[in-house]
Image (cartoon, grey):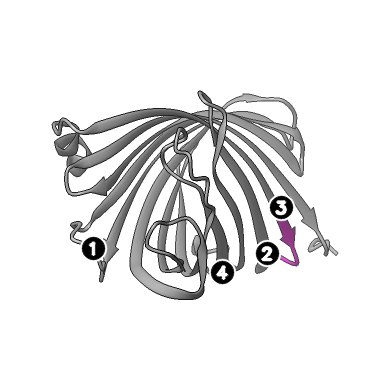
Amino acid sequence: MLSQFSAFAQKNTTHQNLIWYGYYFTQQFNEKWFLQTELQERHFINPLAQHQFIIRTHLHRTFIKTGWDFSAGFCLFLQNPNNPNTAVKLTVPELRPHIEVGYKQKLNKITIDHRFRTEVRFFQQTNSARTSLEDDFEFGNFRMRYKIQATLPIWKIDHNRALKIKASDEILLQTLNKTDLGIFDQNRIYAGLNIDLQPNLSFELGYLNWFQQSSANQFYNRDILRFTVYHTVKWKNDSK
């Protein structure tokens, strides 16, 4: 966050407005194992232009008594130009395998989630004018992410459902970067409301501020309206 505030002092900051839509589908095999698949569509508002599309899946092994969670996964990331007004609309694929460690703790009514993720980024190559894709993928960098999130129930609907407030901050740092950029990549601050429509289905509406460095003196400051659906299917009843 200190890096973000320091970067705000730079003059070359581009402000953008976006909307993100997300669907998170969790397959709960038992109390120890679950598989989560994410679909995300991200687009600019004015002008209306696609920015990114994401498909990510990850397998989790949880240790409920200790609060720890370990996972590994893979992401297909489709990146469109950061400038929605550009004449060339080339979509560049990126491949991202990752490993992750999570920790959950309870502080009275508040649940604190910590997430440590390391991902390796491979970008499909383009021609020098960035108008067409080449066949090869090339290593880009390692990226380390730490996210802390607080969840507080504010209204209990029934035994299995509630209205909750969420607030989080995530810092993303890059290493072995092949450009002249420093270690700071981006920071994301989020606040939202989550409501359980069913015990296994919830909807979330929130605001995300995404501050990202794109070059040595160029930054993006993005205001994002975020809609997310969380859907869980349990394949085994652990109570039996």
The CA distance from mark 1 to mark 2 is 35 Å
The CA distance from mark 3 to mark 1 is 36 Å
Q: Amino acid at mark 3?
A: Phe
Residue 136 in magenta? no
Secondary structure beneath disc 3? strand
Report which residue position mark 2 lands on. Answer: 35
**4 vs 1, front mark:** 1
Mark 3 Cα-neighbour bin, 10 Å: few <14, some 14–19, many ≥20: some
Q: Which residues are magenta?
A: 25-30
Asked if marks 4 and 1 touch (Cβ < 8 Å), the reply is no
Report which residue position mark 1 lands on. Answer: 179
Q: Amino acid at mark 2?
A: Leu
Mark 1 Cα-neighbour bin, 10 Å: few <14, some 14–19, many ≥20: few
The first of marks 4 and 1 along the sequence is 4
Picture quadrant where residue 199 is located:
top right
Picture quadrant where residue 138 is located:
bottom left
Quadrant that contains the C terminus: bottom right
Q: Residue at x 34, y 62 (%)?
A: 144
Numbered mark located on residue 161 in the image: none
Q: Nearer the viewer, residue 238 or 40?
A: 40
Secondary structure beneath disc 4? strand
Mark 2 Cα-neighbour bin, 10 Å: few <14, some 14–19, many ≥20: some
Q: Is residue 233 above or below residue 107?
A: below
Secondary structure beneath disc 2? strand
Asked if marks 2 and 3 touch (Cβ < 8 Å), the reply is no
Direction from residue 102 to residue 28 in the image, left or right: right
Numbered mark located on residue 73 in the image: 4
Residue 27 locus on image (x, y percent): 74, 60
Q: Is residue 189 above or below residue 60?
A: above
Residue 162 locus on image (x, y percent): 66, 30
Quadrant that contains the N terminus: top left
